[in-house]
Amino acid sequence: MSRAPDITGDVRCATGRMVLTVREATMTVTIPFSASATYDGAPGTIGEARDFAGDFLVRAEALHGVPVTTGTAGTVKLVVSELVTNAAKYAPGPCLLDLAIGRDRTGLPDLQITVWDTDDSLPRPGAPDPERIGGHGLELVLALCTRYDIQRLAGGKRVRVHVALR
């Protein structure tokens, strides 16, 4: 557990003027924190996974004190959408989404997003091509994440990426 700074304060009226008194407080950050969901690739799967990721981040912040900016939440939802889209599009059968908050190599909060699917072919990012229509999902994911690992496993593959929570 670590301590994250937070600012609290109160406002009072003194002779018609607003006076703000600010004092520093602390909030406990509880790490690790994780959750998983399984999807069948049916219509609506990608939206459900995106909502699951958004709800996870809300819980991480509210219950565990993990700081999550609006920009980071948007990045996480985009990354989850792209990874689950690829699983639903290319892999027969279910996929598993794991979200886990831990610490990166420097000790800062880090979100690990893992998608397991049943297709054992490894995705390869295409060469950047602004003329190409589609096929940019993995390029986006790799540009937005701090680390990634793609591994072929018995019965499919695992795609794991990390997003900094700063």
Image (spheres, helix red, strand yellow):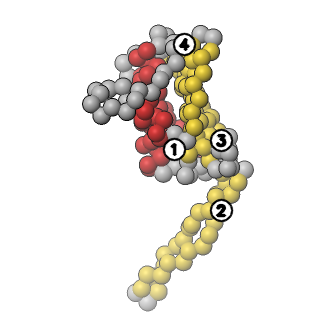
Viewer can see residue 50: no
The tag earlier along the polypeptide, 3 or 4, is 3
The alpha-carbon separation of the residues under discs 4 and 2 comes to 46 Å
Residue under numbered circle 3:
102
The alpha-carbon separation of the residues under discs 2 and 1 comes to 19 Å
The alpha-carbon separation of the residues under discs 2 and 3 comes to 20 Å
Q: Amino acid at mark 1?
A: Val
Residue under numbered circle 1:
58
Verify CB contact (< 8 Å) between mark 3 and mark 4. Answer: no
Q: Residue at x 54, y 71 (%)?
A: 9
The alpha-carbon separation of the residues under discs 3 and 1 comes to 16 Å
Q: Position of residue 89 (x, y in %)?
A: 40, 17
Residue under numbered circle 2:
26
The alpha-carbon separation of the residues under discs 3 and 4 comes to 27 Å
The nearer-to-camera label among 3 and 1 is 3
Give the crowd class for mark 4: few <14, some 14-19, many >=20 residues within 10 Å: some
Verify CB contact (< 8 Å) between mark 3 and mark 1. Answer: no
Give the crowd class for mark 2: few <14, some 14-19, many >=20 residues within 10 Å: few
Residue under numbered circle 4:
120
Identify the secondary structure beneath mark 4: loop
- Figure check: 34 above or below 84: below
Give the crowd class for mark 1: few <14, some 14-19, many >=20 residues within 10 Å: some
Identify the secondary structure beneath mark 3: strand
Viewer can see residue 145: yes
